[in-house]
Image (cartoon, rainbow, N blue to C red):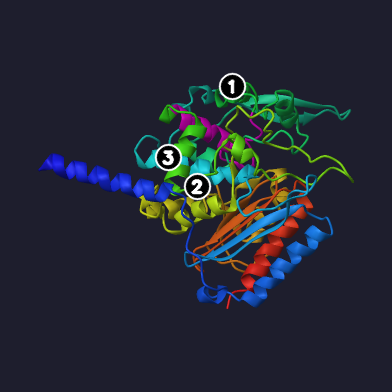
């Protein structure tokens, strides 16, 4: 009897996996009004993107809006590759940069739910190399010469520090501190390294801040990606593809593309009149070996919407559960302690910055809205969000049962911020 029950359970689980992994699209609303959105007002969003493509401001984009579990709006604008005059398609694949971070954090939280990772632990329990790091303290002489003194950590980096960017790690390309210069010299963002090699470089460098003292956007989530690899015994690409993407039906989400997928890769605006497209991030001619947990994934708008719908559903989609409801609630709550300091780069995050003056905080891999009135764009208390340096952006609003995903390849920071703000305003203005 027991063996028959076991076999039946295996069959049920297998059927659920096959159903979810089929990549069946989310249901479509017959009209936006079916889920409480105005088609007339959504037309304003269409007009803005079409006008900007026509005037050459952006090459193209894909935008999806989901409410009550149904797709209310889905449009492909402009060109997937303007230089080749290849029109954008809804299944175009984008370099999603830091929108990788929430997926990496889900991977880590899945291991936590299995009892294999403790968020309160010192990170050195999983990566012993992190045990004896030092902190770089800049000093300036009377002549104005800068030097770097080293001091020991006052406490170890915890897994939670890595998950909420309070580890003291930074990014090399986004400032000119002496620690950031050292990051650049070490070539920490080399896409031909492995996560293990990245960590070896990182631990040879000082931290920018004492652990737990400062929110500083940086390489913390890349280290989480390495922890996932060490605990699971497989590389981060395999973990994401086999344990997150395939079960959720995210058929075009991975760190590496096959030859057919490359044909759908969205390109950046050509550099100058008649110029060739810029290549930033994934290069099909020289695929990356570094599965960056902070920024290396490629995905489509529909794939990412499925990921967001799983979160909005409390960790489950189409019968496949990755996380418990309470884990998702915890992940998407503000984890920054009172009186935390903020690194200089934080303001550069624009409307995503987890600053009290914007009424926002930071959870585990996502920004979190804490107040209605302080933000520079509409939203709801409890909505969570993030974007990437290559242009994409998403948010999930549990109060409104709303998901919005914008896939765009645009590296200019001012342009990225403009479209994120526009999306927020135009989508919320369309709510009936």
Q: Which residue is mark 1?
A: 197
Please state which of the two labelled residues, at mark 3 or mark 1, is closer to the viewer. 3
Q: Which residue is mark 2?
A: 250
Q: Mark 2–mark 1 contact, CB under 8 Å?
A: no
Q: Which mark identifies residue 243?
A: 3
Residue 87 image position (x, y, % from top left): 72, 52
Alpha carbon distance from label 2 to label 1? 29 Å
Figure quadrant of the N terminus: top left
Along the line of sight, the residue nearer the viewer: 167 or 340: 167
Q: Which residues are magenta?
A: 207-230
Please state which of the two labelled residues, at mark 2 or mark 3, is closer to the viewer. 2
Q: Is residue 314 left or right of residue 137?
A: left
Dot 1, how many residues are within 10 Å of its Cα: few (below 14), some (14-19), or many (20+)? few
Q: Is residue 221 magenta?
A: yes
Alpha carbon distance from label 2 to label 3? 11 Å
Dot 2, how many residues are within 10 Å of its Cα: few (below 14), some (14-19), or many (20+)? many
Residue 359 image position (x, y, % from top left): 62, 61
**On screen, residue 1 above or below 338:** above
Along the line of sight, the residue nearer the viewer: 196 or 250: 250
- Which secondary structure lies at badge 3? helix
């Amino acid at each position: 009897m027991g063996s028959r029950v076991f076999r039946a359970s295996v069959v049920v689980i297998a059927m659920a996996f096959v159903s979810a992994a089929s990549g069946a699209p989310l249901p479509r609303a017959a009209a936006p009004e079916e889920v409480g959105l105005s088609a007339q007002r959504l037309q304003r969003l269409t007009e803005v993107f079409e006008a900007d493509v026509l005037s050459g401001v952006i090459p193209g984009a894909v935008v999806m809006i989901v409410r009550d579990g149904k797709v209310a709006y889905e449009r492909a604008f402009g060109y997937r590759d303007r230089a080749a005059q290849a029109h954008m398609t809804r299944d175009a694949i984008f370099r999603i940069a830091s929108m990788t971070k929430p997926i990496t954090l889900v991977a880590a939280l899945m291991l936590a739910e299995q009892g294999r990772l403790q968020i309160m632990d010192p990170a050195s329990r999983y990566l012993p190399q992190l045990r004896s790091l030092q902190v770089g303290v800049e000093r300036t002489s009377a002549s104005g010469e800068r030097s770097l003194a080293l001091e020991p950590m006052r406490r170890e980096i915890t897994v939670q520090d890595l998950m909420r960017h309070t580890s003291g790690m930074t990014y090399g390309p986004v400032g000119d501190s002496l620690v950031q210069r050292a990051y650049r010299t070490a070539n920490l963002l080399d896409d031909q390294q492995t996560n293990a090699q990245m960590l070896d470089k990182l631990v040879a460098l000082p931290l920018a801040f004492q652990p737990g003292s400062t929110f500083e956007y940086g390489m913390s989530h890349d280290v989480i990606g390495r922890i996932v690899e060490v605990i699971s015994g497989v590389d981060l690409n395999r973990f994401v593809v086999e344990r997150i993407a395939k079960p959720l039906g995210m058929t075009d989400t991975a760190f590496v593309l096959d030859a057919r997928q490359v044909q759908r890769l969205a390109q950046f605006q050509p550099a100058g009149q008649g110029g060739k497209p810029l290549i930033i991030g994934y290069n099909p001619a020289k695929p990356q070996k570094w599965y960056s947990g902070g920024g290396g994934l490629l995905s489509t708008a529909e794939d990412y919407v499925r990921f967001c719908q799983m979160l909005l559903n409390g960790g489950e989609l189409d019968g496949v559960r990755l996380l418990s409801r309470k884990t998702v609630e915890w992940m998407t709550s503000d984890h920054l302690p009172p009186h935390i300091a903020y690194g200089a780069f934080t303001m550069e995050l624009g409307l995503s910055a987890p600053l009290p003056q914007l009424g926002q905080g930071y959870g585990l891999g996502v920004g979190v809205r804490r107040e209605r009135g302080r933000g520079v764009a509409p939203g709801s208390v409890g909505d969570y969000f993030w974007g990437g340096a290559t242009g994409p952006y998403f948010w999930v609003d549990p109060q409104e049962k709303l998901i919005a995903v914008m896939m765009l390849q645009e590296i200019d920071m001012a342009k990225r911020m403009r479209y994120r703000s526009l999306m927020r305003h135009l989508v919320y203005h369309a709510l009936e």
